[in-house]
Amino acid sequence: MPSEVHEELLAWMHLASAGFLNGRHAMNPGEAAATDGNSPRNPYNVYLQIIYDRNYADAGTAVNKHNLKTGPQIPVEILAEVDRKIDDGNGTRGAFRYSTYAGNAPSAPLAPAPAYAPGQCMMPTGTWYIPQGEVNCGGASLL
């Protein structure tokens, strides 16, 4: 395969080929966007992403890090519970954080998770904002 610039797509093929993922994920030369053939989806029908960027919430200034994005359309209660179980329960620090990655859904265009605005998915302090019951949130697990 020729050199590809979209490593965030090629990573899924490498993980599947190495036996770390079930199923088959293959990137065709020149592909620049996630598809059912090259990327897995979350249970809410949005593509996951492995990438090196700073598109995640940070208590200070975010820096580029390798991270796994969940994609949007996930209820805030679920992300808060994941954060409490695997990390520190704060969406702006630790290994699991809030992210606005859009995840381009395969069946219909979906809005990205809301920007880091108070009272939607989380508060400025990093507390997940559960009272509103936002259903369009996303997370990033920093690697």
Image: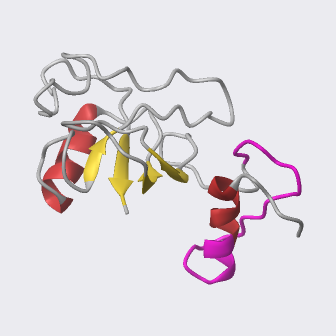
Q: Is residue 103 toward the left or the right of residue 56 in the image?
A: right
**Residue 79: percent from left, percent from top:** 26, 43
Q: Nearer the viewer, residue 40 or 97?
A: 97
**Residue 61: percent from left, percent from top:** 28, 36
**Residue 66: percent from left, percent from top:** 45, 58
Q: Nearer the viewer, residue 6 or 18?
A: 6
Point out the image quarter for the C terminus: bottom left
In magenta, the rendered stretch is 14-35
**Residue 21: percent from left, percent from top:** 57, 73
Q: Residue furthest bottom?
A: 18
Q: Nearer the viewer, residue 66 or 91?
A: 66
Q: Residue at x 89, y 57 (%)?
A: 29
Q: Residue at x 20, y 16 (%)?
A: 118
Q: Is residue 41 toward the left or the right of residue 97 in the image?
A: right
Secondary structure predominantly adopted by residues drawn in magenta: loop
Q: Residue at x 56, y 23 (%)?
A: 110
Q: Is residue 29 toward the left or the right of residue 72 in the image?
A: right
